[in-house]
Image (cartoon, rainbow, N blue to C red):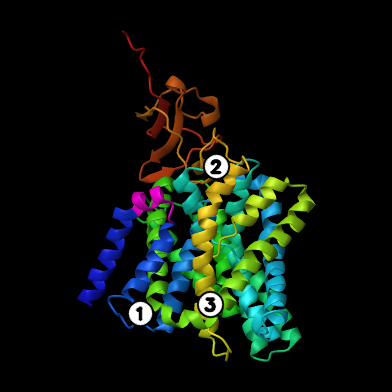
Amino acid sequence: MLFVLILCSVVILSAIFTHKFLDALGIPTLLFFMCLGMLFGSDGIFKIDFTNYTFTKEAASIALGFIIFYGGFCTKWQTAKPVIIKAGVLSTLGVFLTAVITAVFCRYLLGFNLPESFLIGSVISSTDAAAVFSILKAKKLNLKDNTAPLLEVESGSNDPMSYVLVVLAITLIKGASVNFVFLLFIKQMVFGILAGILLAKTAAFIYEKTSLINEETSSLFIIALVLFAYSLPVFIDGNQFLALYFLGIILGNVKMYNKIPIMNFFDGITKLAQLGIFFTLGLLATPSNIPSILISGILIFLFLTLIARPIVIFALLALFKSGIKQCILVSVAGLRGVASIVFAIIAANSGINLHYDLFHLVFLICVLSVALQGALLPIVSKKLNMIDELSDIKEIFNDYEEECAVKIMRITVPPKHDWVGKSIRDIVFPQKALAIFIMRGKKRVIPQNHTIIRAGDKITLSAPAIEYPEYQ
């Protein structure tokens, strides 16, 4: 146990100390930790014999759930709304077409049987939001034509569809009927969405209409919601990852006290989850097994990257009259990552018999994708002149805080003050201040335009700081 704790400390400290160095070299951080895991693994220097696929599946699935939730939680509806239909088509129909086209390649050019070909296509059909935005944020690249929000919503929401296809492929390999598979597909989608919306609306009601949640318990409350949204859909054949994404995107766009600190907390949680997953997957991998699938893995990666995804992207974005530069950039940004490897482990532990090493096949494809496509993404963005130099990539996320000078004021309203009985909209606060929240006894009230001020209210105001001219 002590060795495990020391190993965890080494991994976390490595993340802290190597972050800026890796960014400067253009090496994706997640790829580094995957390689670090292999260094500690059975074929590495430290020879740790770790082959517990069952534990990895459970731990990685839960960690992936937090990552998918956070992807929705950070999505700013204001920036996502203009591209929501386009991104929705890419994350559903686009994922399905990618899986089918890749399956055709695996069946007729590589010789895999049809169900196993569809399983391969399904596992690698989604893109990795963490990998894409770790590169864009590190290079501070915002993209023109709403491309960054498009990639954010597409890559953040396409994992659930990929997971549904993986479940269907596993069910087909087990010999289920077409009618059963179709019914399972409907249940996965409908129950997953309903579970996410129901939990999100319940949580929003608790935040907005009650005082049950305070600053100290808000993060714990959301952690409990995430775990509940991960577990509940399983009992009704719903898609837990779809539930988590809807929970995140709805909850991330409701008025919530202390939202920025909560997002900062979950940002740390998801970073830790990403590093832990990539390190564990690297630890689980056995590089000596890769030569047996090397040619197949490289061919699938090249076909997926150069043919399958570009065909799907150009075909679907043509429906929205997107420019050719955006189509090229979205094609290049289709990095495969942690979700694909986790889905491969889920398939390998589902009790089906496969004629190939699915885990190492997908592992190789994802390593190639993160390494090569990750390095090309900033270069292609510049070559296509798709970088918006006047905006910040962080602006598209809910946790973005504009840098400006402000000061905080707190005012207690006396019993006979002119504000008593008036609504927020009818009050002109000093120095053009905005009401942040109101303490009414022990109850915290989030100010709305219609909120009526009462005697004894303690109002916290945010006002622009006074900037004095510099004298020379």
Q: Compared with residue 315, is residue 470 higher up or lower down, i.e. above or below? A: above
Circle 1: residue type: Asp
Considering the image in quadrants, where does the N terminus appear? bottom left
- The part of the chain drawn in magenta is 19-27
Residue where numbered disc 2 is placed? 142
Question: Which image quadrant: the C terminus?
Answer: top left
The residue lying at 27 percent from left, 59 percent from top is: 13
Mark 3 vs mark 2: which is more N-terminal? 2
Report the mark closest to the observer, 3 or 2. 3
Q: Quadrant of residue 444?
A: top left
Q: Amino acid at mark 3?
A: Leu
Q: CA distance from mark 1 to mark 3?
A: 17 Å
Residue 432 or residue 450, whichever sits in front:
432
Q: Residue at x 39, y 40 (%)?
A: 440
26 magenta-colored: yes
Whether the residues at callouts 1 and 3 have beta carbons within 8 Å, the answer is no
